[in-house]
Image (tube, rainbow, N blue to C red):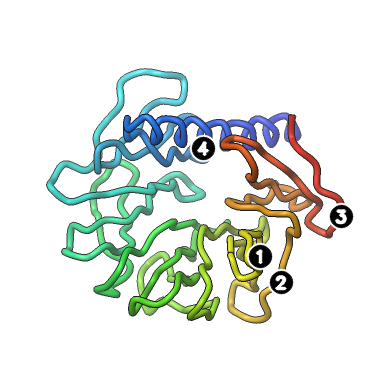
Amino acid sequence: QPEVTMKRSIFLTFFLLSISFIYAQQDLLLRFPSLNNDGSKITFSFQGDIWTVPSSGGKATRLTIHEAYESNPIFSPDGKEIVFFSNQGGNYEIWKSKSDGSGAVPLTSFGGPVNGTPRWSPDGHLIAFDSRKGGSALNIYVVNSDGGIPKMVTFSSAFENNQPSWSHDGRWIYFSSNRTGRIEIWKVPADGGEEQQVTRHGGIAAFESPDGTTLFYSKGLPGEIWKTPTTGGLEERVD
């Protein structure tokens, strides 16, 4: 049963990402779906607001209702909160609210370019995100889920590092980088340190399996999913 649940979760995650891409291409603006902890709800962004809908289908509920723009919503591991980015304070910052949309507060105050792609750590204590702080290249940052001073964990002024995600044990942060001349998956210790290349033949938007044995990622055509052992080895396409 756990294996079935894991496979269902992985399939649904990438299926939603694929559908999100297709809708975005068709300018329907239904984007960035995220499943909650028990699989009962999906949060997504639509026309600059955050919404939720039962995963079994039904009426969607709008959580943010104002002139600001919100996107990239992600449920916390316990399903009680949602993190997203918003410009309701004037600049694009990382924000957090309860799962019903109430109690929204900013977690960053960079006051500059877009901060985006927020991702909860497995224990819900930290949030990784990418930012072009100061107008430089995109880099990965980590901030406490209750707020505080964000910590920079990748350091680049020439290459783009973005789309972070966590290892199952919270020790590593995967991210995409074009530093080799092609977009590949890399990883860095969650508290900073040596950055290590993971893929060698292209890769973007990585997610580790719940048991930590497999890394899933996208490359090639939209919706094309690949996998490789987290300990290293041959990659193969997921059919």
Residue type, label 1 = Trp
Give the labeled residue for mark 2: 196
Binning the other alpha carbons within 10 Å of mark 1 as few (below 14), some (14 to 19) or many (20 upward) gives: many
* Quarter of the rendering containing residue 91: bottom left
Q: Who comes first in sequence, dot 3 or dot 1?
A: 1
SS category of the residue bearing label 3: loop
Residue farthest toward the left in the current orientation of the protein: 67
Under circle 2, the secondary element is strand
- Which residue does the numbered mark 3 point to in the structure image? 233
The x, y position of residue 164, in whole percent, is 54, 60
Q: Amino acid at mark 4?
A: Leu
What whole-number distance in Å separates the C-alpha atoms at marks 3 and 1? 15 Å
3D distance between C-alphas at marks 3 and 4: 25 Å
Q: Earlier in the sequence, mark 3 or mark 4?
A: 4
Q: Which residue is mark 1?
A: 186
Looking at the picture, which amino acid does disc 2 mark?
Answer: Gln
Q: Report how far apart the C-alphas of labels 1 and 4 lie in the structure.
A: 20 Å
Q: Which residue is mark 4?
A: 17
